Image (cartoon, rainbow, N blue to C red):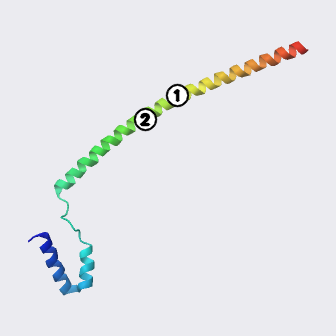
Amino acid sequence: MTEVTARAALYSRLSEVIGVDNAGTLMSYLPGEEPATKLDIRRLEEQIDHLDERIDHLDDKLDRRMDEFHFALLAQGRTYVIASIGSIISTGALVAAITGVMG
């Protein structure tokens, strides 16, 4: 018996027992295709494993990028501090020179 024939027979019998409306409602909840097989589930597991590996690879890549970013940020911060100290010393020297000339 094909699936279409089996579904039609089931609907016919359900209609007799619980009525046409209830049979239609119940049949609408049944899957329209064949249920998944063990092979389908194995293939899905393989796809999930592959996705998991790709996510791990992306996670490692992101970690490396973040490490590079932190290093660049630290270097930029050091440059900023050194430049700021140089500016402060230069400004202080100019103020001292101007006040020495005027005083």
In the image: residue 92, left or right of residue 45:
right
Q: Is residue 81 above or below residue 46?
A: above
At 76% from the left and 20% from the top, the residue drawn is 91
At 87% from the left and 17% from the top, the residue drawn is 99
Q: Report x, y in % for residue 64.
A: 42, 32
Give the Cα separation between the discs numbered 2 and 1.
14 Å
Q: Nearer the viewer, residue 70 or 33?
A: 33
State the mark number for residue 63.
Answer: 2
**Which mark is in front, 2 or 1?**
1
Q: In what quadrant of the picture does the C terminus appear?
A: top right
At 47% from the left and 31% from the top, the residue drawn is 67
State the mark number for residue 72.
Answer: 1
Q: Report x, y in % for residue 47.
A: 26, 48
**Label 1: which secondary element:** helix
Q: Is residue 15 above or below residue 52?
A: below
In the image: residue 7, left or right of residue 58:
left
User: Which residue is situated farthest in the right direction here?
Assistant: 103
